[in-house]
């Protein structure tokens, strides 16, 4: 178990980083809800992709995102994608 091999200090750094990132996610969700309301009030309709259509959209978005990341980081991008895509 890789986690058990880390020192308490290393584990704390990772836990703190995870908590920080979770906080950003919560903040982003609040901003998204505020923006949806603002746009709805302006007459802009929100659309959602669900089921197979949603899965295809997400897959395409990830592929495009990784392609741009790898283009910008050709030496480390492919390995990072491999490590994070397992």
Image: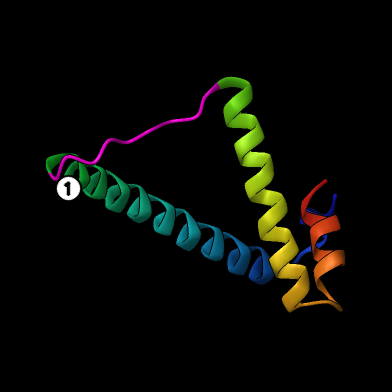
Q: Look at 38% across and 33% down and name the residue there.
A: 47
Q: Look at 68% across and 56% down and name the residue there.
A: 64
- From the viewer's perspective, is residue 62 above or below residue 20? above
Q: Look at 46% across and 63% down and name the residue there.
A: 20
Q: Nearer the viewer, residue 16 or 8?
A: 16
Residue 71 is drawn in which quadrant?
bottom right
Residue 12: x and y in percent read 59, 65
Q: Which residues are magenta?
A: 42-50
The secondary element bearing badge 1 is classed as helix
Q: Label 1 belongs to which residue?
A: 38
Residue 50: x and y in percent read 52, 24
Residue 58: x and y in percent read 62, 40
Dot 1 crowding, Cα within 10 Å, few <14, some 14–19, many 20+: few
Q: Confirm whether the magenta stretch covers residue 44.
A: yes
5 left or right of 35? right
Residue 79 is drawn in which quadrant?
bottom right
């Amino acid at each position: 178990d890789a986690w058990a091999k880390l020192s308490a200090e290393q584990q704390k750094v990772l836990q703190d980083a995870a908590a920080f990132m979770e906080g950003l996610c919560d903040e982003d969700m609040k901003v998204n809800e505020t923006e949806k309301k603002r746009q709805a009030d302006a007459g802009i309709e929100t659309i959602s992709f669900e089921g197979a259509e949603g899965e295809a959209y997400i897959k395409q978005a990830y592929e495009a995102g990784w392609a741009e990341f790898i283009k910008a980081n050709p030496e480390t991008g492919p390995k990072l994608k491999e490590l994070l895509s397992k």
